[in-house]
Amino acid sequence: MSRFAPVALTVTSALLVLTACGGGVQGTPGGSGLRDPYFPKAGNGGYDVAHYALDLAYDPDDRHLTGTAEITARATQDLSALDLDLRGMEVERVVVEGERARFSRNGQELVVRPHDDLDEGETFRLTVRYSGTPRTLTDPDGSEEGWLPTAEGALALGEPTGSMAWFPGNHHPSDKAAYDIAVTVPEGLQVVSNGELTHRSSRDGRTTFRWHTGEPMASYVAMLAIGDYDIRRSTVATEADNGLPVHTAVAPSQADAGRAVLARLPEIMEWAEDNFGPYPFSSTGAVVAVENAAGYALETQNRPVFPGAPDTELFVHELAHQWFGNSVTPRSWRDMWLNEGFATYAEWLWREDDGGDSAQETFDALYDHGEDEYEDLWSFPPAEPTSAAHISDAPVYQRGAMVLHKIRQTVGDVAFHDIVQGWAADHRHGNADTDDFTAYVEKKAPDKDFGPIWRDWLYGDGKPDRP
């Protein structure tokens, strides 16, 4: 159907039209999606979130979650209504600027109609009270995200859109915010989230954990780990902080192998800062969950989550994401290679510096025999995945790293080092897309011709000619 074809007026849209035709209403509804190339309904138009305050309580026995989400945002247009992304859960009440607001549900959209219009530029506070059993969502590629129940608790992971299973929000990587997350659980369980633990208290057989994330965070890298964890706190020296907090959580079944890998965190952090520049966040660490909690590792902000003890290179990959993906965040899901290409190339660099194959040897092996390991390696270019089901496939990771190596070959090691560190610094805590990156590289090395790299390696179909 043509995008301009007329559609039937739904009950929700009819109410909005009637409201807009009422006396004195000047605003229009915000968009119900941001037209992301692969997840067009993700995120919402008309506002920008500055802060989420989540107050949650979870009972693992009946898998019941109750929550209050207080969202502070700025209207980017005159608004008569706005949408939040929320999959499942029962919404009990919505309040905007102290006034009860009408609301309705439409798939993953929670449509909110404030009592009074919101003016463009106005900062407003919206509160949603909700409860229910959070859902486990299945991605287009078949992996599971959202709320993942475990024997003792749960693991909440959000890439690409799973965070809408446990809190309402503007769930697109282009809208980053600060977070305060409080979670109450039965006494004896631990709760780990992003940022720093600011308070812990117990009362009447229940314990509340309060976590604060001050730096901007995309909702897809927000996380919760609830369960029986061995929690350890320490510090590590960085360029900016001699006592950067380290929070690690390891499931008892992973204690020996998990702790052995995590012991290398100071060494890896020092190496990463040498290569990528100052660490961009106010704490670091990791969560090593039980092996069946999730089928993948994820670069959740401040402390990545691993399904069982990772090997060192996987640990390096997820920590590199703190610079590339978490601090410099993709503007849309089409730009996923800027996350995964950099993190994969970090593995190559670590291997090179740790006495293994050089990055050139890794590149050559992939070019000559990569299809033996990755059947789809040459199936599409890294900057243009064929669909949402393929944004995490080998071309995005491995060919993305090959693009970076081609840049290194072109400019030399010193200039490449400057490009990588400069890219991370110039876009720190922001969003960027592929066009931003190619323009940045060309600006940093104006005497070099990158046209063949962009044409053949970044956007080209099939296997490029022998380099």
Image: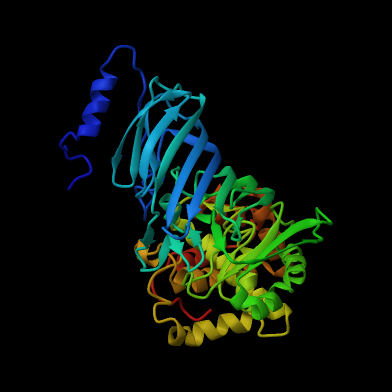
Q: In the rendering, at what x and y percent does residue 440 appear?
A: 60, 53
Q: Judge by depth and name the residue closer to the eye, 68 or 20.
A: 68
Residue 166 seen: no
Nearest the viewer among 96 and 454 is 96
Name of the residue lying farthest toward the front: 204
Q: Quadrant of residue 188?
A: bottom right
Q: Does residue 117 appear in this view?
A: yes
From the viewer's perspective, is residue 70 above or below residue 195?
above
Name the residue furthest right.
242
Point 40% across, 45% down: residue: 131
Residue 461 x, y percent position in the rendering:
39, 70
Q: Measured from the top left, where is residue 365 in percent x and y?
A: 55, 86
Q: Of 392 and 363, which appears nearest the observer? A: 392
Q: How many marks?
A: 0
Question: Nearest the camera: 204 or 256?
Answer: 204
* Residue occupying the point 35% across, 18% down: 26
Placement of 119 over or under 445, stated as above or below: above
The image shows residue 37 at horizontal and vertical percentages of 37, 53
Relative height, residue 157 to residue 204 (above, below): below
Residue at image coords 44%, 64%: 459
Q: Quadrant of residue 216?
A: top right
